[in-house]
Amino acid sequence: MSITREIPVRPPLALTVVGVLGGAALLLPFVALVAGVDLRRLPRLLTSPEALDALWLSLRTSLTATAVCLVLGIPLALALNRLDFPGRSLARSLVLLPLVVPPVVGGIALTEAFGRRGLVGEHLHALGIEIAFTSAAVVLAQVFVSLPFLVVALEGTLQTRGEAHERTALSLGASPARTFLTVTLPLMGPGLLAGTVLTFARALGEFGATITFAGSLQGTTRTLPLQVYLERETDPEAAVALSLVLVAVALAVITLAYGRRRVRLP
Amino acid sequence: MSRALPALAAASALALTGCAGGVSEAGATAGDVTLTVFAAASLADAFEEIGERFEVEHPGVEVRFNVAGSSSLAQQIRAGAPADVFASADEPTMDRAVEADAVSGSPRPFATNVLALVTPPDNPAGIASLQDAAAEGVDLVVCAPQVPCGAATATLAADAGLALAPVSEESSVTDVLGKVTSGEADAGLVYATDAAAAGDAVHAVRLERAGSAVNTYPIAALAHSEHRELAEAFVEFVLGAPGRQVLRDDGFGAP
Amino acid sequence: MTGLDCRVVVPERGVDVAFAVPAGQTLALTGANGTGKSTVLDALAGWLRPEAGHARLNGRTLFTAGTGHDSWVPARHRRVGYLTQDARLFPHLSAEANVAFGLDRAGVVGRAARRRAARAWLERVGVGELAGRRPHQMSGGQAQRTAIARVLASEPQLVLLDEPLAALDAQVVPQIRALLAEVLTGRTTVLVTHHAADAEALAHATHRIARAAPARPPTA
């Protein structure tokens, strides 16, 4: 078997140098983070009751938020991609709003909506349902900031896949529900996986909206990022160690979402 | 574009000729020296005012503030941030800067602050005392013990023999205040100065033994300041009559 | 009357075509590119709503449009099978599962029965041994054979073929053409093709769409 190599079209050398600098700017802080950890203290820092509570809470809430995002996000992406309605392009842009708005603003908006005196929260309060200061508030904040990630990923997949297979299924007599379950959903596969993983990662990293809207109490609302922020006040080393956990999770997530892409393409 | 060009030319000509004399004059008042003061968040308003007065007495000096939580500031100073003066909200935090040999001389106390119990203006839970705020079913928000206002909260509760059961322990006074003004929480423990600054946005409840948890604010010129004398002068200014008056007006106590 | 009788008017594509296909016969629809052959098939399949016209299949109305009392039967209730030049097999399903997909409409109930029926169809189109393969493990000819089995297994009353041989390697074209000739016998079919050979081998009659008037933009 002979080895053929295509000649790549290389960017100018100067651009490559700048590009490498850009890469360094992205990676250097993480290298410093790893270098800043005292490995001998690491196990004890990571297994303190506060750290374990925060980690467990973060995992629970992020998984819940991801599940909620899937339930809401798949229909939303389908509606935005497949339904023809007036103002569709506006709606598609509005979905991105939580993605570009500073998280604090998101937190304030959530308070205005679901807070005790908020638009919806007022009525919930009257019914005896309290969201503020509960883990549900954390999940709500996480869903708010991470749902756009899922919708964007799914919409991209739907766009590239087109509707041909669904049309075929309908012509073969399948109901819309069956078409969705047996054709649309499986064909979303790779995009769904990447989107889900990114959604989880974003939920896990949520900070601004949570601290503004949900509060901060060990085991209830103080997720890992909030714990890092608080540890920073008194024990910067513990903060660095916990940060490392978040970086490790993020790294795993990115590998899962994008690492296998090269293998997948048919 | 073509119409803008002559205007631009005229403007630059003016800058080159007519205004040439004015530049050095303006330079003198705009500040040849910039003094950088790291101040605890609760000092923001008071120090802004003190800074303005200081600039009036010291022509050519511009005072700039970096306002944040004391712990963050101490960390930045230890990491070598270019600051001339550090004013902390409590002594342990200042001690950390001292341990790092970042302070010139020894820090001096210049103000005190006590805690205040605040509720939303309509006081929905009908809170009249710290006991009320500690009761079950009351959404009380406090500072986390890791930050100065949280340490003071712990002292206050211990003195009153109460076990507080907060629904949230925030990282800063601002976050506590925000949860109260938005009506999320029934009550919150903040600094008296924050309660005063919030005005009508909160209802302040008198704490009987507020004096049991007094935070003392220390100030110090920093060792690596490039304007050591000016930094010392600023510290004296804060400790002197003008500084004291501003601080008193804002609700701070005297050390 | 049985068979197909239709008129499809899509002004923005310059399409106004009317024809009839007697029951059990195949009509070849020919014409230059851009004359709207595929548009007609899309309208008959229920994938595109024409501005005016009608379609009746074995006495059932598929659609009427532009008459004031329009009606529209959605694609899944039409019993119209559509085979395109790319097989469009579901990539995540085996050949057998692809064929079984349309068996519901044919009234085949039960796992074992569906399996048997799907296998029988795959045998009939000559790919019985590929039942477990995924589409990406098949050649173009094998995929198109599977697609033919899938369309026919759903027991359509009308079969639409849009250039079914166009995407295939030249050497397999005669075999697939022969297969189509065999399995389409007795089925009401509309075949869109560029090739006289296809029309000759498969169709009883040919309807040539003339270059229509230039398309007018859609009215607001």
Image (cartoon, coloured by chain):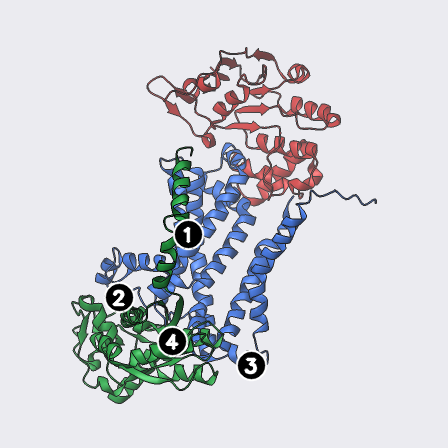
Chain colours: A blue, B green, C red
Whole-Å distance between the Cαs marked 1 and 4? Answer: 43 Å
Q: Are marks 4 and 2 on the same chain?
A: yes
Residue receiving disc 4: B230
Whole-Å distance between the Cαs marked 3 and 2? Answer: 39 Å
Q: Is residue A9 left or right of residue C220?
A: right
Give, as a three-letter code, the residue at label 3. Answer: Arg
Identify the residue at horizontal 42%, vertical 48% (top origin).
B16
Q: Is residue A16 left or right of residue B225?
A: right
Viewer-proximal residue among A180 and C77: A180
Q: Is residue C3 above or below residue A223?
A: above
Number of residues whose C-alpha sits closer than 10 Å to that of mark 2, classed few (under 14), some (14–19) or many (20 or more): many
Residue receiving disc 2: B184
Chain of the residue under the numbered disc 4 shown in the image: B
Q: Which mark is residue C22?
A: none
Number of residues whose C-alpha sits closer than 10 Å to that of mark 4, classed few (under 14), some (14–19) or many (20 or more): some
Identify the residue at horizontal 52%, vertical 57% (top origin).
A197
Residue receiving disc 1: A100
Under tag 3, what secondary structure? loop
Under tag 4, what secondary structure? helix
